[in-house]
Amino acid sequence: MTTPNSGDTVTIDYILRRTDGEEIANTAQVGAQEITLGNGQIFPQIEEALTGMEIGDAQTVSIPVDQAFGQRNAALVMDLPRANLPPEPAPQPGMALQAQTPDGQPMMLQILEVGEETVKVDGNHPLAGEDLTFDLTLRAIKPKI
């Protein structure tokens, strides 16, 4: 029985679903993903599941909202003066912006609404407030050298 260990690189396929079962992402669209275990690339629950799997095994892992991207924070939905944005490209709902927090850390914002004077943005992760379910399949194990 060969199972991966911390430091090994694994190739996985997955389907990511929201609580209501809506599919959010699927490696069938983007190709199998390589992950090195033990370096924090993925949720700890997925790493734990993978370390017990053999090539070809499949498993479903559920990650509750508080261990995923947390609850939505209403304070992260805000109005910004439109004058603070570059004129091009013109802001549109759904567009992503990169901003900085007061302490200089990068922060991604999504434009929700565009008004004449302000733009409503959301700084929450797009999956904040969601329980997540991953259907995993282990495809390959490349042992740590």
Image (cartoon, rainbow, N blue to C red):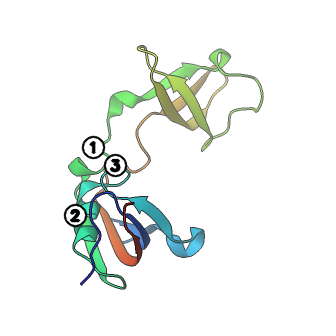
Q: Nearer the viewer, residue 73 or 104?
A: 104
114 relative position to 46: left or right: right
Q: Secondary structure at mark 1?
A: loop
Mark number displayed over residue 71: 1
Q: Is residue 44 above or below residue 85?
A: below
Where does label 3 land, which residue? 39
What's the distance in space between the residues labelled 1 and 3, CA to CA?
25 Å
Q: Please identify the quadrant where the C terminus is shown.
A: bottom left
Residue 55, given in percent of the width and then of the height, sits at: 35, 82
Q: Quadrant of residue 84?
A: top right
Q: Residues within 10 Å of mark 1 (few under 14, many from 20)?
A: some
Asked if labels 2 and 1 touch by Cβ distance under 8 angstroms, the answer is no
Q: Residues within 10 Å of mark 2 (few under 14, many from 20)?
A: some
Residue 100 visible in rendering: yes
Residue drawn at 28 percent across, 61 percent down: 47
Judging depth in this view, the residue of 24 and 38 nearest the camera is 38
Residue 70 at what x, y percent from top left? 27, 44
